[in-house]
Image (cartoon, rainbow, N blue to C red):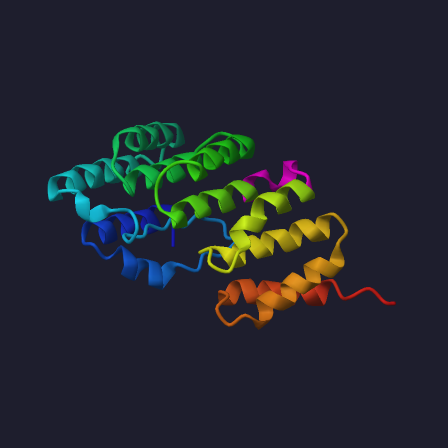
Amino acid sequence: MSDVTALQEIDDAVRQDRAKEWWSRYGSWVVGVAVVVVVAVAGGVGWQRYTAAQRATAGATFSAALAQTADQAKAREALQQAAAGATEPYRSLAALAAAQYQATPADQAKALQAAAQGGGSVELKDLAAILAAMRAADGSKPDELIRDLEPLAAKDRPFRASALELIAQASLAKGDLKRAREIWAELVKDETVPQGVAARAQAMSMLHPAEAK
C-alpha cells in the first residue's frame, strides 16, 4: 500500500464514520517498512461534535493536499496549511503526513516530535512518536532512545510492539544483548503482536544467539 493510498483510504473512512473498522483492519503498524501508514481512529476524538459541512470541508482540504504528493515541496506546504486550519483528526493526519516531506531525517524527526506533542488521538500521537524515534535513531544515543520509547511500550499503548522492537535494536546497539533477546522472546511469544514483527524478532534471536557462559 502506498502512502497516498493509505491516507486516502483513511480519508474515506473518516468521511463515512468507518475509521474504527479501518483501524481494526490496519491497526498493526509494522516498523521498518519503506512507506508510512497513517491511521485515524474515530473514537476518542469527539468527531460527533462536528457538522457534516465541517467534515466535508476538512476532508476536501486534506484530499487536495494529498494530491500534491508528486512535488514534495508543494505537498509539504499544502499539508502544513491543512494542519493549521483543519479540525481533528485531519489536523493531526496532515501534520503527520507533512513531516514525511521534510528535507532531512533530522527535520522529519523534529516535525514528528511536534506532532506527538499536539492534539489528536492517543493513536496518532503515539504513531508520531514512534516515527520520530525511527527518524532520530541514527543520531540519538541508545539510552535516550530507550527512555523516550519506554512509555510507548506499555501494555495499553497502541504501538507497543513497534516500540519494543525499537527498544530491542537500541539495546543491541549499546551492547545489551541480554535485554534485546528478552524483548525478542517476548515479541515472539505474544500472540497479539503483528506477524511481521514476530518474524523479525525470531530472525534477530537467531542472528544474535545468547553469549556463551
Q: Position of residue 60 (x, y in %)?
A: 20, 38
The residue lying at 50 percent from left, 67 percent from top is 195
- Farthest residue toward the right? 213
Q: Position of residue 172 (x, y in %)?
A: 71, 53
All told, the count of numbered labels is 0
The residue lying at 28 percent from left, 32 percent from top is 82
> In front here: 4 or 128?
128
Q: Is residue 113 visible?
A: yes
> In front here: 14 or 47?
47
Residue 58 relative to residue 183: left or right: left
Instruction: Choose top left, top right, bottom left or bottom right for residue 138.
Output: top right
Q: Is residue 32 visible?
A: no
> In front here: 47 or 13?
47
The residue lying at 37 percent from left, 60 percent from top is 26
Instruction: Choose top left, top right, bottom left or bottom right for residue 119.
Output: top left
Instruction: Choose top left, top right, bottom left or bottom right for residue 176.
Output: bottom right
Q: Most prominent secondary structure in the magenta stretch? A: helix
Residue 138 lies in the magenta stretch: yes
Residue 32 relative to residue 88: left or right: right
Residue 144 lies in the magenta stretch: no
Magenta span: 134-141
Question: Could you tell me which quadrant the N terminus lies in?
Answer: bottom left
The residue lying at 31 percent from left, 52 percent from top is 41
Q: Is residue 39 above or below residue 113?
A: below
Q: Position of residue 213 (x, y in %)?
A: 88, 67
Residue 159 relative to residue 82: left or right: right
Q: Position of residue 185 (x, y in %)?
A: 64, 68
